[in-house]
Amino acid sequence: MRSRVALVSAVVLALVIGALVVVLSRADPATTRKADSPLLGKLAPDLADHRYDLVSSAGQWVLVNFFATWCTPCIAEHDDLLRFSNAHALAGDAAVVSVVFSDDPDNVEAFFEENGGDWPIVLDGDGRIATDWGVARVPESYLVAPDGEVRAKIVGGIEYERLEALLAEAKASAR
Amino acid sequence: MRFVAWAALGVVVIGALVFGTTDRDPQTEAERVQAIAESVACPACSGQSVASSDAPAAANLRADIERRVAEGESAEEIRAAYADRFGDEILLNPPSSGAAAVVWVLPVVAVVAGGAGLVVAFRRWRRDW
């Protein structure tokens, strides 16, 4: 009787562990996770400080990246953003714009001087841009199509290869 | 005599319900900001309102509520604007229309069904005695 109970328990445990392994192996990785947003399919809100205007980038895909220098995943994703920006600089088909989230502009300037990156940086002193875009925490990024429509929301850090795949997918669905 | 007791109980219950559900509008601008902040969820937290959270996103929303109230937007306009950007889950009080209205209707249905059950049970007990 005892051995039967043990056998059934072992089988149930094995099934639960197996199911967990399957679910976790199919889950999105921690980086470049696509997320739902009411903004998807709508025109991107203004980047309101007028230092950068999404309209002026018409014809380009734009990755609007909300970040802060105090945020560890933001620091970790910077090299991937740099790679993405450099990879598309020549073709001019995609660009990065960073929006500062609850951070000191001096820290941001020092961060870019030290780590590189010559894309536009938008200050958001009163947090109004982040609120307009529905940003809950950083890093969060939005992929905006050349027609100004928001096509994807990405939560967590960016990984270069996955971002390229996401851009290719968005370009294909836009055709 | 029994009728008077039941009528008095009814008056007390209805009075309590009316008192509890009537909105007492906040008077000052600061009170309006506080009331709205208490009804909006902090998008970066779990179960906290914008009024009670220190998260940067909550601070941004508090500042935005202050600005919108100063510009004359109503509480409903502000809440609708946030639902439009963050989704309905940003609202701590669910909307009273659509599928979310079930949240408001279900307790009433439960109270009515419970009351009806009690009436039936009391009648049965009285008959059995």
Image (cartoon, coloured by chain):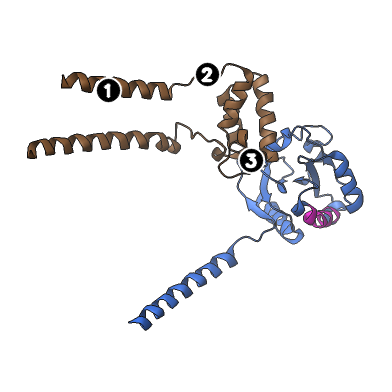
Chain colours: A blue, B brown
In this view, B41 is above or below A12: above
Q: Quadrant of residue A134?
A: top right
Residue B109 is left or right of residue A88, and the answer is left
Dots 2 and 1: beta carbons under 8 Å?
no
Secondary element under disc 2, as helix, strand or loop, is loop
- Magenta range: A75-86
Report the residue at 54% width, 65% height from top: A23
In this view, B27 is above or below A159: above
Marker disc for residue B10 = 1
Q: Which residue is mark 2?
A: B25
Secondary element under disc 3, as helix, strand or loop, is loop
Chain letter of the residue beneath label 2 in the structure image: B
Residue B79 is left or right of residue A111, and the answer is left
Residue A175 appears in the figure: no
Circle 1 Cα neighbour tier, 10 Å, few/some/many (<14 / 14–19 / ≥20): few
Report the residue at 81% width, 54% height from top: A78
Q: Nearer the viewer, mark 2 or mark 3?
A: 2
Residue A55 is left or right of residue B86, and the answer is right
Circle 3 Cα neighbour tier, 10 Å, few/some/many (<14 / 14–19 / ≥20): many
Q: Which residue is mark 3?
A: A39
